[in-house]
Amino acid sequence: MRWYAVTLVFLAFDMEMIFMYPWALVVADIGAAAVAEMFLFLGLLMVGVIYAWREGAFRWA
C-alpha cells in the first residue's frame, strides 16, 4: 500500500509537466487568464503534495 502513495505523487508531477509544456507555448497569446489558470492548476497539485506529505509518502526509510 505504501507504493500506492508514491505512484500518485509521481503521477501528479508527471501530469504537471504534460500540461505545463503546451501552456508555456501559448501563454503569450492568451495573456493573464492563462497565468491565473496555471496558478490554479499548480495550487491543486500543491494540495495533493501536502496531502501526500501528511500521509508520509515522502518518507523513504
Image (cartoon, rainbow, N blue to C red):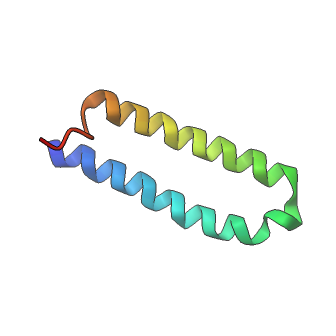
Q: If the image is split into quadrants, where does the N terminus sit?
A: top left
Where residue 26 sits, quadrant-wise, is bottom right
Instruction: Name the quadrant containing residue 25.
Output: bottom right
Where is residue 30 drawn, in percent x and y? 86, 61
The residue furthest front is 61
Which x, y percent locates residue 53?
Answer: 33, 33
Please state, as top left, top right, bottom left or bottom right, where the C terminus lies in the image. Answer: top left
| In-image side of 59 versus 25 (left or right) | left
Residue 22 % position (x, y): 66, 70
Name the residue at 35% across, 55% down.
10
Choose top left, top right, bottom left or bottom right for residue 29.
bottom right
Q: Residue at x 83, y 50 (%)?
A: 33
The answer to whether 14 appears left or right of 26 in the picture is left
Q: What's the residue at 55%, 39% (across, down)?
A: 44
> In the rendered view, does 39 fall on the left or right side of 45?
right
Residue at screen point 18% across, 49% down: 3
Q: Position of residue 16 (x, y in %)?
A: 52, 57
Q: Is residue 51 above or below residue 27?
A: above
Q: Residue furthest top?
A: 54
Figure label count: 0
Q: Is residue 40 left or right of residue 49?
A: right
